[in-house]
Image (spheres, grey):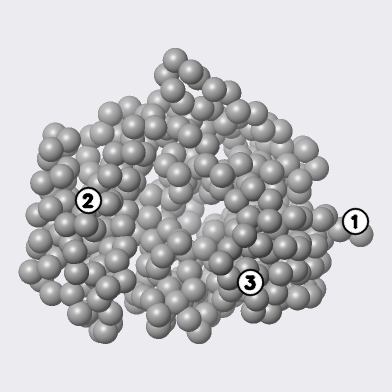
Amino acid sequence: NLKMIRVDGSMLEGGGQILRNSVSFSALLGKSFHIEKIRKGRDKPGLKNQHIGSIQAVAEICSAQTTGVELNSEEITFTPGPLKSGTFNAHLSSAGACMLIAQAVLPVAILGPSCQFSLRGGTNVDFSPQYEYTKYLFIPVIKRLLDIDVEMECEGRGYFPIGGGRITLKATPKHSLKAFTLRDQGHVTNITCYIHAGGQINGDEIRKLKEKTTELLKSRFESPIDFIVHLESKSKSRTAGLIIIAETSTKVMISGDSLLTKANDFNKLATKAFNILITNLNQNGCADEYLQDQLIIFMALANGKSVLQVGEISLHTKTSIAIAELFTDGKAKFKVVEDKINKFNLIECDGMGFVNSNFV
């Protein structure tokens, strides 16, 4: 495909997500692109380690030729070649976000040849979904909605600033994706709280965090509350994080999370995650703000009409929709329907019906 798609890296949300979605679509659809003004509105514009990791990982799967892929670069070109199967590495020397690299490679792993990935870097870092979110919310949701098989394991946490976390990721390829409907939030039936902490956090501090989290949740819910705690004893970090996942009667999963790199205020950690959970539930959607934008690429590639009930439509989601329409040449048609009475939005998409030509 000789026509190069022009992407404005500063549009809408203007962040790294434009890049991640662009490389995924490019690899699958065989379309070259040129992106400029990368992360233009950010304090430190241009490519950072995790963006380079995402581009290089996808470039390796699709034998792409690239220009401009270097630290702080504000424009790149990406010309994909044939997709190939294998084990691919994205090993960052910093605490760059592994979960964001996972976002870039997953669509290609699901709708391309058989791939598995070894990721190194930050597993629980700021400005990125935490490992538990991806493992216990995002992956179960896409498994159920898209009938796919994805496995992700963590062999060691990576915290800021050192990183060094180890993740393995693999997906069983599909011939194509069926459209899905995710509507009706239902009522909360059970809550799971995932706590992770570096080796400098002690048992008393974790107990305080559990107590405060329990107190807040019991003030609002009658459902059972479970805790799963992971202490990364080898780590010299004082990072601690909490991810609360509420599951509902309609199998919807909504979350709230918080992360402190120098954790000392455990009440603050619990309160922030709880408040985000309540805000997300009150939106009356079936996908919280982190999930909604990640589902857009799958809606665009699927065969048939998908419907997703959300509260407010995030800027990330609007950006994902714009990139999907650009790369599919309008073959994926999105429409937003506002339900003023019940105070939610429906994102509808007639997918392009992508077929995996590498499917065996």
**Residue, x 67% and y 33% (percent of image)?**
334
Q: Is mark 2 on a helix, strand or loop?
A: helix
Secondary structure at numbered mark 3: loop
Relative placement, left or right, of 150 versus 228 is right
- Give yes or no for contact between labels 2 and 3 (Cβ–Cβ under 8 Å): no
Q: Nearer the viewer, residue 189 or 52?
A: 52
Closer-to-camera residue (166/341): 341
Tell which circle, 1 or 2, labels the residue nearer the N-terminal end: 1
Please state which amino acid type lies under the numbered disc 3: Leu
Distance from Cα at disc 3 to Cα at disc 1: 24 Å
Point out residue 256 in the picture as x, y percentages from the top left corner: 32, 48
Nearest to the eye among marks 1 and 2: give it: 2
Disc 2 marks a residue whose amino acid type is: Thr
Query: Which residue carries the number 3 mark?
Result: 47
Residue 215 visible somewhere in the drawing: yes
Residue annotated with mark 1? 3
Q: Where is residue 275 in the image (x, y as percent from the top left)?
A: 28, 44
Q: Which of 49 and 90 is in front in this view?
A: 49
Residue occupying image coordinates x 31% and y 62%: 259
**Residue 108, position as x, y percentages in the image:** 64, 58
Residue tagged by mark 2?
271
Q: Is residue 132 left or right of residue 188?
A: right
3D distance between C-alphas at marks 1 and 2:
50 Å
